[in-house]
Image (cartoon, rainbow, N blue to C red):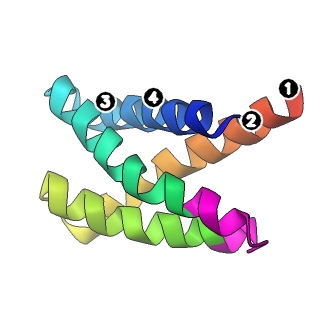
Amino acid sequence: MNLIFAWLLTIIIEFLVFCLFFRKYYLRLLLYSVLINSITNPLLNFALLFGINMILLEFLVFAVEIILIKLLFKLKWNKSLIISFCANLASFLIGIALGRAI
């Protein structure tokens, strides 16, 4: 899958997950999704070039996104963890499904 397409798709999926949790400030949610995924997605794809295990990388992205979500949204750790988990699970599963369909 094209890296830019994967990045944009991840932004859209995680933005939609953010919308499910917050239901307001949609432009801010989109901006945060772009910011978060502009940090984590290129790093994940770069690390994949070196054959690093995908599950390990997804876990690291999940952990980094917990921190970024906590800081940007000013949330408690437990809510940041839940949102990060849902956003990353959704983008991972949709990415896998699309990767197999293409």
- Upstream in the sequence, badge 3 or badge 1? 3
As measured in the structure, the alpha-carbon distance from the residue carrying label 2 to the one carrying label 1 is 8 Å
- Upstream in the sequence, badge 2 or badge 1? 2
The amino acid type of the residue labelled 1 equals Ile
Q: Nearer the viewer, residue 16 or 102?
A: 102
- Upstream in the sequence, badge 2 or badge 4? 2
Q: Main secondary structure of the magenta part?
A: helix
Tell me: 61 left or right of 79.
right
The local secondary structure at tag 2 comes to: loop
- Upstream in the sequence, badge 2 or badge 3? 2
Task: Name the residue beneath numbered marker 2.
Answer: 1
- Upstream in the sequence, badge 1 or badge 4? 4
Task: Name the residue beneath numbered marker 4.
Answer: 12
The local secondary structure at tag 1 comes to: loop
Quarter location, residue 27? top left
As measured in the structure, the alpha-carbon distance from the residue carrying label 3 to the one carrying label 1 is 28 Å
Query: For the magenta stretch, what is the residue range?
Result: 44-56
**Image location (x, y in percent) of residue 14:** 43, 38
Tell whether label 1 touches label 2 (CB within 8 Å). Answer: yes
Q: Label 4: how many residues lie within 10 Å, few (<14), some (14-19) or many (20+)?
A: some
Q: Is residue 68 visible?
A: yes
**Which quarter of the rendered picture does the C terminus lie within?**
top right
Tell me: 47 left or right of 82.
right
Task: Name the residue beneath numbered marker 1.
Answer: 102
Residue mark closest to the camera, 2 vs 1: 2
